[in-house]
């Protein structure tokens, strides 16, 4: 299809899982994209690490491949730079150079945005260029644009999400089959969900990067990965999952970002990633397999739920393509995407002040006064007990205690004190509980 207008020229950095699908969609949907944008899109070059690598039947001229990404993004005939390489450097240099020179950027690089989004936003402001990154959080799910645009007339108070597909697959599998973490991880690896080195996923680094990006957009405040409290899910056991089931709950690796007053009444932001029990009635409880979902609460809108595929080449490329169309349209009409909104400068609340609930499972002796002693420790730290359940007898009893909401520091201090009690043989598990009364 000819639009009569000169092409919008694209530099693609990276042609792996996501990049190759971007190339395929650009080719397959060329006519529709031209009609939607009002001008054709044209690849000016593709930077990769290994240009000779076998790339199947990718519909692209091999002459477009280069290993010199920096020269590619500096070319005068490039309008939009698409970065799907990942990592901090050299991606930061490529993208900062591009933005400062006035070239729009579309990136899926959550690690860079969470570690040093400020450098990219500042470069975009300096160059008057667009910075789009819908694919960086929750893959195909249109989530950042609603936070960045649709909800800008409202006040977002809380974002609760399942933003890592690998760990959601593992926890869903543990819940369905009763398997332990190791067995479920093996299954996730065999099915191609978990990477050879699953550390970033299972230790919560990937979710923490996404949490920082979500919190920055939701609360108009620069939040980095270093501001996010992070606890992975490798310590979740089959017994924890069974215990959650017995309470009508399931365990999910959650990202939680909320705004509210701290202990001194100062409006602040708390951002954390950790496994938590949530009631089966919670909208996130039914999100299984490797799916992602994000539950947003805003003052006027109320609760909103976003659900879909959070990873994979084609779903992620869908989000990248949406950003390319937006950036291309802006260039043709001489307009810009909404720039960064970080005016609120809200302070970050430490994890100790985050209000949460704990589920604690203790192995104790079933003797007179044990419950009173245990309850005394909770009272000492001003933690209110919601429920107590005992199973077993004599020297072999288990107490399962669920608390009401309390600052995390008080809950931790309670657990530490419980460990020192001679009547407590061991603390079998400690898990946070979210999303219930
Ligand atoms: P891949 O590892 O599959 O692809 C990376 C690409 O970058 C490859 O084409 C590689 O070249 C190229 N590359 C690596 N180093 C360089 C370099 N120094 N110069 C030029 N090219 C380089 O990654 P993915 O496609 O999975 O991920 C890309 C980005 O998208 C990351 O930021 C990731 O976090 C993000 N993302 C990925 C999702 C997914 O499901 N995969 C989901 C959401 C976001 P070569 O092909 O020659 O090896
Ligand atoms: N490893 C990530 C996941 C990919 O499992 O969700 C998407 O960022």
Image: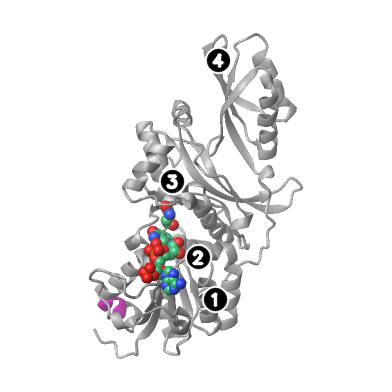
Q: Whole-Å distance between the Cαs marked 2 and 4?
A: 49 Å
**Magenta includes 353?**
no
Q: Position of residue 390 (x, y in %)?
A: 54, 17
391, 154: nearer the viewer: 391
Q: Whole-Å distance between the Cαs marked 3 and 1?
A: 31 Å
Looking at the rendering, in which quadrant would you find the N terminus? Answer: bottom left
Question: Residue 397's mark?
Answer: 4
At 30% from the left edge and 91% from the top edge, which residue is drawn? 4
Q: Which residue is mark 1?
A: 93
The answer to whether mark 2 is within 8 Å of ligand 1 is: yes
Q: At numbered mark 3, what does the secondary structure look like: helix, strand or loop?
A: helix
300, 354: nearer the viewer: 354
Q: At numbered mark 4, what does the secondary structure look like: helix, strand or loop?
A: strand
Q: Which residue is mark 2?
A: 87
Task: Name the chief secondary structure element in magenta.
Answer: helix
The answer to whether mark 3 is within 8 Å of ligand 2 is: yes
At 42% from the left edge and 45% from the top edge, which residue is drawn? 168
- First in sequence: mark 2 or mark 4? 2
- First in sequence: mark 4 or mark 3? 3
For marks 2 and 4, give the one nearer the viewer: 2
At 68% from the left edge and 31% from the top edge, which residue is drawn? 416
Q: At numbered mark 1, what does the secondary structure look like: helix, strand or loop?
A: helix
Contact (Cβ within 8 Å) of mark 3 with mark 1: no
- First in sequence: mark 3 or mark 2? 2
Q: Residues in magenta?
A: 30-35
Q: Whole-Å distance between the Cαs marked 4 and 3?
A: 32 Å
Does residue 231 sit above or below 12 in this rendering? above
The answer to whether mark 1 is within 8 Å of ligand 1 is: no
Question: Residue 167's mark?
Answer: 3
């Amino acid at each position: 299809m000819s639009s009569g207008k000169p092409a919008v020229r694209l530099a693609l950095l990276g042609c792996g899982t996501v990049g190759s699908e971007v190339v395929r969609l650009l080719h397959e949907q060329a006519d529709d994209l031209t009609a939607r944008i009002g001008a054709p899109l044209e690849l000016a070059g593709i930077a990769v690490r290994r240009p000779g690598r076998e790339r199947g039947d990718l519909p692209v001229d091999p002459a477009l491949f280069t290993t010199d990404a920096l020269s590619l993004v500096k070319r005068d005939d490039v309008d939009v730079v698409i970065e799907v390489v990942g990592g901090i450097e050299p991606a930061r240099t490529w993208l900062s150079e591009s933005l400062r020179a006035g070239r729009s950027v579309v990136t899926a690089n959550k690690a860079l945005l969470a570690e040093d989004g400020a450098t990219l936003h500042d470069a975009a402001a300096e160059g008057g260029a667009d910075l789009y990154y819908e694919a960086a959080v929750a893959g195909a799910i249109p989530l950042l644009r609603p936070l960045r645009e649709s909800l800008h007339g409202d006040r977002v108070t809380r974002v609760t999400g399942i933003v890592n597909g690998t760990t959601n697959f593992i926890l869903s599998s543990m819940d369905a089959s009763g398997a332990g973490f190791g067995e479920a991880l093996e299954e996730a690896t065999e099915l191609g969900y978990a990477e050879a080195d699953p550390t970033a996923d299972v230790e919560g680094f990937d979710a923490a990067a996404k949490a920082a990006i979500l919190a920055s957009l939701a609360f108009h405040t620069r939040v980095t990965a270093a501001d996010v409290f992070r606890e992975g899910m490798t310590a979740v056991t089959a017994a924890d999952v069974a215990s959650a089931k017995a309470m009508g709950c399931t365990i999910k690796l959650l990202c939680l970002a909320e705004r509210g007053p701290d202990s001194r009444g100062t409006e602040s932001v708390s951002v954390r990633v950790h496994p938590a029990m949530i009631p089966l009635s919670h909208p996130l409880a039914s999100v299984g397999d490797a799916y992602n979902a994000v539950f947003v609460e805003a003052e006027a809108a109320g609760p909103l739920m976003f659900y879909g595929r959070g990873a994979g080449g084609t779903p992620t490329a869908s989000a990248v393509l949406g950003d390319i169309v937006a950036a291309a349209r802006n260039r043709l009409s001489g307009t810009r995407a909404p720039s960064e909104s970080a005016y609120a400068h809200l302070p970050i609340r430490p994890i100790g002040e985050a209000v949460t609930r704990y589920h604690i499972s203790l192995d104790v002796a079933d003797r007179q006064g044990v419950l009173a002693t245990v309850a005394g420790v909770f009272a000492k730290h001003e933690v209110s007990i919601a429920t107590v359940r005992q199973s077993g007898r004599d020297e072999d009893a288990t107490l399962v205690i669920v608390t009401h909401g309390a600052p995390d520091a008080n809950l931790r201090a309670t657990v530490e004190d419980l460990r020192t009690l001679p009547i407590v043989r061991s603390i079998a598990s400690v898990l946070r509980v979210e999303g219930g009364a």
